[in-house]
Amino acid sequence: MDFYDNAVDVHEAAEILFKNKKYRMAVFNACLAVELYLKSRLPLVEYDIRLESSHDVINIYRCLTARFKVPEQ
């Protein structure tokens, strides 16, 4: 199973927890899903291999946005 498939599973768990009013665990799983979704896109760019095992979502995001510019609002 890869990062993307794991992200989908964790995201679904977050939704179930939220519907059951388990908000603290829902937020935890939602944050983990974001991290996994971002990591699933790392192979599209050059990156430091250590990002795969880190929880540094900010630098993972920066690494991705360096190549894929986010439109200004």
Image (tube, grey):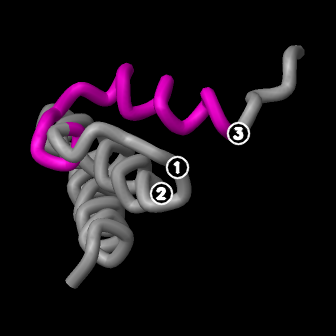
Q: Does the magenta stretch include residue 56?
A: yes
Identify residue type, mark 1: Val
Closest to the observer: 70 or 25? 70
Q: Residue at x 88, y 15 (%)?
A: 73
The residue sitting at the bottom extreme is: 1
Report the residue marked by disc 2. Answer: 41
Magenta segment range? 51-67
- Give the Cα separation between the discs numbered 1 and 2: 8 Å
Report the residue marked by disc 3. Answer: 68
Q: In this view, does 53 lie to the left or right of 14?
A: left
Discs 1, 3 touching: Cβ within 8 Å: yes
**Could you say which quadrant of the image residue 31 lies in?**
top left
- Give the Cα separation between the discs numbered 1 and 3: 9 Å
Q: Is mark 1 on a helix, strand or loop?
A: loop
Q: What element carries label 3?
A: loop
Report the residue marked by disc 1. Answer: 45
Identify residue type, mark 2: Arg
Mark 1 or mark 3: which comes first in sequence? 1
Residue 41: image location, x then y, percent? 47, 57
Q: Is mark 2 on a helix, strand or loop?
A: loop
